[in-house]
Image (cartoon, grey):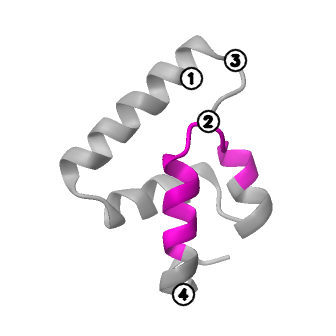
């Protein structure tokens, strides 16, 4: 699915899923067909720069501690 064709409601859902510590990129791909790079690009466009950087730091930190994270 092309992120540019998503409705604002779907974009909000994807952002909320990505911000959740309990939803993996694989779950988002299964539901919306977006890969991790597409989700990261969508998050970069949707969040403020500082919020995006904080989210990426958190995802990386969790990923380093847990084998199956995002």
Identified at 74% across, 47% down, the residue is 26
Looking at marks 2 and 4 on the same chain, the residue that comes earlier in the sequence is marked by 4
Quadrant where the C terminus sits is top right
Q: Secondary structure at mark 4?
A: loop
Gap in Å between the C-alphas at discs 1 and 3? Answer: 6 Å
Q: Quadrant of residue 65?
A: top right
Question: Magenta part of the protein: which range?
Answer: 11-27
Gap in Å between the C-alphas at discs 2 and 4? Answer: 24 Å
Q: Secondary structure at mark 3?
A: loop
Gap in Å between the C-alphas at discs 3 and 2? Answer: 9 Å
Quadrant where the N terminus sits is bottom right
The residue that disc 3 covers is 67
The residue that disc 1 covers is 63
Number of residues whose C-alpha sits closer than 10 Å to that of mark 4, classed few (under 14), some (14–19) or many (20 or more): few
Looking at marks 3 and 4 on the same chain, the residue that comes earlier in the sequence is marked by 4
Quick check: 23 left or right of 58? Answer: right
- Circles 1 and 3, Cβ within 8 Å, touching? The answer is no
Gap in Å between the C-alphas at discs 1 and 4? Answer: 29 Å
Quick check: 9 left or right of 34? Answer: left
The residue that disc 2 covers is 70
Magenta: main secondary structure equals: helix
Position of residue 54 measured from the top left corner of the image (x, y, whole percent): 30, 37
Depicted 34 relative to depicted 17: above or below:
below
Q: Secondary structure at mark 2?
A: loop
Number of residues whose C-alpha sits closer than 10 Å to that of mark 3, classed few (under 14), some (14–19) or many (20 or more): few
- Circles 1 and 4, Cβ within 8 Å, touching? The answer is no
Gap in Å between the C-alphas at discs 3 and 4? Answer: 32 Å
Quick check: 55 left or right of 34? Answer: left
- Circles 1 and 2, Cβ within 8 Å, touching? The answer is yes
Gap in Å between the C-alphas at discs 1 and 2? Answer: 6 Å
Nearer to the camera, 44 or 17: 17
Identified at 48% across, 32% down, the residue is 59
């Amino acid at each position: 699915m092309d992120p540019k064709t998503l409705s604002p409601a779907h974009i909000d859902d994807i952002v909320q899923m990505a911000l959740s510590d309990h939803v993996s990129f694989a779950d988002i791909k299964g539901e919306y067909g977006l890969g991790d790079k597409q989700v990261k690009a969508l998050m970069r466009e949707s969040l403020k720069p500082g919020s995006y950087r904080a989210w990426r730091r958190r995802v990386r930190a969790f990923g380093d501690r847990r084998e199956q994270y995002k």
